[in-house]
Image (spheres, rainbow, N blue to C red):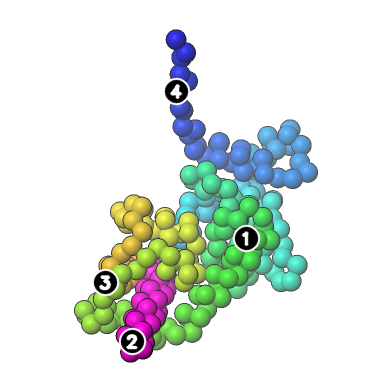
Amino acid sequence: MTRMTPFVRTAHTPAILKQRLVMERQMTSLIDRAFLSEGPHLVRDRSNWVGCWLDTGNRVLSDIDDVEAVRGITDHGQLIWMILHPNKRFGYHAGAKDPVAAIEQARAAWRARRAIKSRWPEVLQLRRDVLAGRKSFVVHIDDARDAGLCDLGIRGFMRALGFGNRVRLSARTLAALSYVDPQAAYALFQAYQRTSGQQRSMRVGATAT
């Protein structure tokens, strides 16, 4: 009888995570990588609901400005690039494999966030309307992504607040949660724009018939 080999899940201990992270360095010998698995260049980060380690010795600087990509690994073992901007307090967790693509991913997210931030009085009014029961709609996880929030941060936020793998929340729930993390208001506003656009399209279609 053939004996089945049991599946063994690899433990994501700090030592294993850091060892895997330094293995991402290019043009570095295996011996040097072994020594690099400990040291001040490996920095712990927990911003935006994502626990990870960053290798500050493995970074790529943009050709056009001071934005840089720092190689990292999450507590769940996912390799990422942390995109840092000198004028932004927090970095962007990008899942792209290539640092250039990761930087472009962050730029697109920052553009989306700026567009919503420029309408912040409307965002705050929407939150008041939702909490008062004057507006009601459903917020999807794609709304958060379209609002410029990183996927890892979205998932971390949902897990930390006990929502697990849910992909939608009521607007009222998210409006309340925006007092825990103001970034939730970006997703709230994006969802309202989406649903408002759908309603306008339906009204136009009904008029045309």
Q: Which residue is mark 4?
A: 6
- How far, Cα to Cα, is label 1 from label 3? 33 Å
Percent coordinates x, y for residue 198 in the rendering: 37, 78
Q: Nearer the viewer, residue 27 or 9?
A: 9
Is most of the magenta stretch helix, strand or loop? Answer: helix
Q: Which residue is mark 1?
A: 102
- How far, Cα to Cα, is label 2 from label 4? 62 Å
Q: Answer few, some or many: residues within 10 Å of disc 1's Cα (few below 14, many 20 plus, some between 14 and 19).
A: many
**In the structure shown, which secondary structural element does the residue marked by tag 3 occupy?**
helix
Q: In the figure, 72 relative to 135: above or below?
A: above
Q: Residue at x 55, y 63 (%)?
A: 92
Percent coordinates x, y for residue 207 in the rendering: 33, 89
- How far, Cα to Cα, is label 2 from label 3? 34 Å
**In the structure shown, which secondary structural element does the residue marked by tag 1 occupy?**
helix
Percent coordinates x, y for residue 60 in the rendering: 71, 58
Tag 3 or tag 4, which sits nearer the N-term? Answer: 4
| Number of the label disc, if any, that sits on residue 209 | 2
Q: Residue at x 74, y 33 (%)?
A: 31
Contact between marks 1 and 2 (CB within 8 A): the answer is: no
User: In the figure, residue 20 lies in which quadrant?
Assistant: top right
Q: Is residue 126 visible?
A: yes
